[in-house]
Each structure stands twice: as C-alpha cells, then as structure tokens.
Image (cartoon, rainbow, N blue to C red):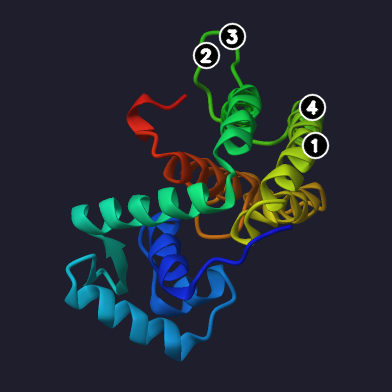
C-alpha cells in the first residue's frame, strides 16, 4: 500500500528536485494548494531552509544548505517509516544502467559526429540518426515503467515518472524536438534528472559520487 507524504515534506522536497522554481511550480509539482504552498514556503524561509531570489526577470525558491539537510532528514525518516529502504536501493541499482543509456541518447540527440569533427552539433537532418535516438529513449522508457511501479508501491510522491517520460517522448516523436532535452519543459531529460535527484535524495546519496 502506497503512503502519501505530508505537505511540509512535499514542499521542501519539490524545491529540492526542481532546483530553483517559483511558488506556483513548487505547488504544481505534487498537486498542492498554491496558497498553502506559499504559506509553507514562507514558514520554511523563516527557519532558514529555503531562500527566495530574483534575477534576469526570473524569481524563485531554492534550498539552503540547512534546508537540504532537513529535506534529507525528513526523507530518511519517511523511508524508514514505510520500510522502503531495501526496495528503493534495489531500484536505484537497476536505474543506473538505464541512466547511462539515457545520457548517451541525449548526447546523441545533441551531437552527430561527422568526418573531422567528433563534436559536430546534430542538425536533425539525418532522420535515421534521430529515429535511432528516439527508439533508444523508448527502450529506456520501457525499462523505467517497472521501476516506477516498484517505487510507487511505497510512496505516492515517487509515482508518475514513467508517465511523464512517456508523454515527453510522444511529443518528441510527433516532431517537437525540444521535448527530448530542453530544461524549460517537462522533457525526457528533465523528467529523468528529477527522478535521479529524487532517488539520491531519498537514499541520502551525494550526487557528486552518484553515477
């Protein structure tokens, strides 16, 4: 039976996995009430766990060092409470080979080596090349589906990554190329990055040492 996480954990965790985001995006990440989310953000700002900043026309919230530590403390307590550590650890081990394939596919989407230039940008004129990358992403998505199901059996906040990845891939296959790797939409790459961050945060792994 899956467990729903409390709002205070979800707000702090949404800031963690989004990196830098406005209050509306933080609320949207886990389907929270926008007004309650903003109130929670101000509460945790007073505790020194998040900070608000604006620059170049953008504004948003990000975690402080102490906020990151508090997020990991809450996640560890939750994981212990639901008894999910062995399974989430096993999922992470199974995730890593797929992570390597995803990274290679995104690189191939951005670069297409030509004679004399191994780092030539992919101009997307070679339809066979792009089709092969999209097929590789489909294989990655197929591998993700059972992992997402296993994660969702413990915590509802870990559900949906496979559905978001599949939705992004459908748009990419329909010709919207940015849905492979853009960072400002819910692309395959963005969904995958969030999942990776979610797993290492949940397990207390340092991303610098993570594969």
Task: State if disc 4 and disc 3 touch (CB < 8 Å).
Answer: no
Mark 4 and mark 1 lie on one chain; the one further toward the N terminus is 4
The quarter of the displayed image where residue 167 is located? bottom right
- Residue behind mark 1: 138
With respect to residue 32, does 157 lie above or below? Answer: above
Taking the spot 49% from the left edge, 71% from the top edge, the residue there is 6
Q: CA distance from mark 3 to mark 4?
A: 20 Å
Mark 1 and mark 2 lie on one chain; the one further toward the N terminus is 2
Q: Nearer the viewer, residue 18 or 9?
A: 9
Taking the spot 40% from the left edge, 78% from the top edge, the residue there is 23
Characterize the local packing of mark 1: few (<14), some (14-19) or many (20 or more) Cα atoms within 10 angstroms: some
- Residue behind mark 2: 118
With respect to residue 125, does 198 lie above or below? Answer: below
Q: Is residue 137 left or right of residue 88?
A: right
> Can you say which quadrant of the picture contains the N terminus?
bottom right
Between marks 2 and 3 in the image, the one whose residue lies nearer the viewer: 2
Q: Position of residue 9 (x, y in %)?
A: 43, 66
Q: Position of residue 4 (x, y in %)?
A: 61, 67
Q: Is residue 126 left or right of residue 21?
A: right
With respect to residue 206, does 176 lie above or below? Answer: below
Taking the spot 58% from the left edge, 32% from the top edge, the residue there is 92
- Residue behind mark 3: 115
Between marks 4 and 1 in the image, the one whose residue lies nearer the viewer: 1
Characterize the local packing of mark 4: few (<14), some (14-19) or many (20 or more) Cα atoms within 10 angstroms: some
Taking the spot 67% from the left edge, 46% from the top edge, the residue there is 151
Q: CA distance from mark 3 to mark 1?
A: 28 Å
Mark 2 and mark 4 lie on one chain; the one further toward the N terminus is 2
- Residue behind mark 4: 132
Q: Nearer the viewer, residue 172 or 42?
A: 42
Q: Position of residue 114 (x, y in %)?
A: 60, 15
Q: CA distance from mark 1 to mark 2?
A: 25 Å
């Amino acid at each position: 039976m899956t467990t729903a996480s409390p709002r205070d954990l979800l707000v702090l965790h949404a800031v963690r996995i989004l990196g830098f985001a406005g209050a509306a995006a933080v609320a949207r990440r886990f389907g929270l009430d926008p007004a309650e989310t903003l109130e929670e953000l101000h509460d945790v700002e007073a505790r020194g766990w998040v900070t608000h900043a604006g620059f170049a026309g953008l504004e948003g919230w990000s975690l402080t060092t102490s906020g990151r530590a508090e997020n990991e403390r809450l996640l560890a307590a939750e994981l212990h409470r639901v008894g999910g550590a062995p399974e989430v650890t096993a999922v992470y081990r199974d995730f890593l080979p797929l992570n390597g394939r995803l990274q290679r596919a995104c690189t191939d989407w951005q670069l297409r080596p030509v004679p004399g230039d191994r780092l030539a940008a992919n101009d997307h004129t070679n339809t066979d090349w792009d089709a092969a990358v999209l097929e590789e992403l489909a294989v990655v998505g197929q591998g993700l589906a059972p992992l997402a199901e296993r994660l969702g059996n413990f915590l509802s906040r870990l559900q949906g990554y496979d559905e978001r990845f599949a939705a992004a891939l459908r748009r990419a296959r329909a010709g919207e190329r940015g849905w492979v790797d853009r960072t400002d939409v819910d692309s395959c790459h963005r969904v995958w990055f969030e999942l990776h961050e979610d797993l290492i945060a949940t397990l207390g792994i340092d991303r610098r040492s993570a594969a």
